[in-house]
Amino acid sequence: MFLAGVTFPIDYYFGVIGTILPTAASTVRRAFQGNTLNSVSVAPSHHSIACGRFHFVSLRSFAAGSTKAMSHSQSLAPSELGPQSSASGNKQALISLSDKKDLTLLGNGLQKLGYTIVSTGGTASSLENAGVSVTKVEHLTCFPETLDGRVKTLHPNIHGGILARRDLKHHMEALNNHGIGTFDVVVVNLYPFYDKVTSTGGIAFDDGIENIDIGGPAMIRAAAKNHKDVLVVVDSLDYPAFLEFLEGGQDDQQFRRKLARKAFAHVASYDSAVSEWLCSLRYGENPHQKAAFYVDKSLSEVNAGGIATAVQHHGKEMSYNNYLDADAAWNCVSEFRNPTCVIVKHTNPCGVASRDDILEAYRLAVKADPVSAFGGIVAFNIEVDEVLAKEIREFRSPTDGETRMFYEIVVAPKYTEKGLEILRGKSKTLRILEAKKNEKGKLSLRQVGGGWLAQDSDDLTPEDIQFNVVSEKKPQDSELCDAKFAWLCVKHVKSNAIVIAKDNCMLGMGSGQPNRLESLRIAFRKAGDEVKGAALASDAFFPFAWKDAVEEACENGIGVIAEPGGSNRDGDAVDCCNKYGVSLLFTNVRHFKH
């Protein structure tokens, strides 16, 4: 047997195989001895690969007891028995494509430039049909495509050749010791998962699973990581520029990085589509709507807090609506510096109170609207301990003094061990979330049909703005504090939004009405007799004053009004407040929330 000028008896190869699987080796030996195949030519340093290759073509058929002799098709040419090495001047390109657009252009271009092309399955067949010389990947891996195509390229002979750093001596020595050649170019695109799962008529779950690419992303990521030495291409539109780059013999690292960035983005988009398809909730806002939830893992969100990264300690699986409501409650309560309780229903805060005594804050938040609070989300900005947990568990509704309050979710920054134990005993279904406060400066995203809207988050607090007195009557310190509290609350209420507050407690709110006057009237109905001397905040200016919202607020006994100003009739609002002796503050900041 010929090996770089040295003849080995064929028993040498069976000896190596025998160390792997002795029984099969003896079977292979008999098959070889009964065949006309008496010698094999192999490339230098590649005898172990040759043995491995005999192992796969033989053991697969002979381990089950078959004694059929190997056919002449299993006699491997020298080029088939060992990968080429770019280090020795032979350039290799690995091509594996689902979308074969412009494949002939790519193959001919690389062949013209002297590249040995290694390819898989259908891609190899397409290249051969186009007259391009191809080495099939199984001749490098020494193993056939298996598991219905699931395993083709997941092999050290492939990934070693992609990932090896050419500037590290021990990397290149490792390749040489194992007979692995390097790849200079990797051109891969992925199974059409997105097109399949979004096709008209849908797709069966099992079919969707089979369209999740495994080997492709692995090769793309490997090549992109090692882009200093390996050019990676994932888009057929880049073929002309890529071939031009190779023809010029350039060493432009910026071009390589551009392709690598595109490759990582391609895989990230692909993985996101798979994650979205798999990570489904029970349903969306309504049972007939499908829904999914996934966490934003972008670098800007690392340790940035929020409900998406909250830890669930207890309760049923979170639903679509649970996430929305918990997010609204947490965003609101996190705004306050003093111990605060916020209760939310359908994303609107229906009760907010700040007190040094968190138990009192909780009771006042429920009292603001006990009917809405029932079945809502209760959030705290301080630790829930044993005493607070007992109060949450046992507190009765102010409407009848008997009905124990029920909540879907409790969310807080942390819990004592005893506090958690007590809350777990309230209900098997109560979801208990531990969340980290949202950092400022996040990007706020909303989807519209066919696209997205992006904006900075509304991070302004009362400390960031001026409450300018525009009326004759100046507010007392307590009134100014109430106005700031109401203004911070109204920021989290859906427009058109009105909040009435006093002594750091929301008394009533009106939300989501097409006109501001109706929202004001709803807020007054909820606040009841406590409105006298209270503060009123509006998320936007009042377009009318006389015989409208401003005058009604004054007639009902409001002591101070905080609004952005900016209306053509701001003068009427000032005159109206002066007539009734009410303080009017302009913030010059609008708080629309749609």
Image (spheres, grey):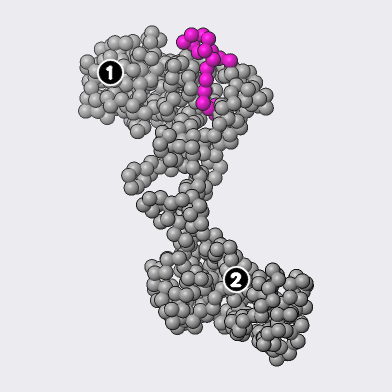
**How many C-alpha atoms fall within 10 Å of the one at disc 1: few (<14), some, or many (≥20)?**
many
Q: Quadrant of the C terminus?
A: top left
Residue 401 lies in the magenta stretch = yes
Secondary structure mostly seen in the magenta stretch:
loop
Q: Sequence order check: which comes first, mark 2 or mark 1? A: 2
Residue 488 lies in the magenta stretch = no
Q: Residue at x 54, y 34 (%)?
A: 317
Q: Can residue 568 be seen at all in this image of the molecule?
A: yes
Viewer-side residue, 392 vs 458: 392
Q: Can residue 381 be seen at all in this image of the molecule?
A: no
Horizontally, residue 66 falls left or right of residue 571, namely right
- The spot of residue 473 in percent (x, y) is 33, 15
Q: Residue at x 51, y 79 (%)?
A: 134
**For the residues marked 2 and 1, what is the alpha-carbon distance in whole angstroms?**
80 Å
Position above or below: 73 against 447: below
- The spot of residue 182 in percent (x, y) is 59, 75
Horizontally, residue 240 falls left or right of residue 422, namely left
Q: Which region of the structure is painted magenta? A: 394-411
Kindly identify which residue carries mark 2.
Answer: 144
Position above or below: 382 against 557: below
In front: label 2 or label 1: 2
- The spot of residue 371 in percent (x, y) is 44, 16
- The spot of residue 70 in percent (x, y) is 64, 80
Q: Amino acid at mark 1?
A: Val
Viewer-side residue, 269 vs 446: 269
Q: Residue at x 32, y 44 (%)?
A: 449
Q: Residue at x 51, y 39 (%)?
A: 308
Horizontally, residue 79 falls left or right of residue 539, namely right
Image-quadrant location for residue 137: bottom right
Kindly identify which residue carries mark 1.
Answer: 550
Viewer-side residue, 455 vs 466: 455
Q: Amino acid at mark 2?
A: Pro
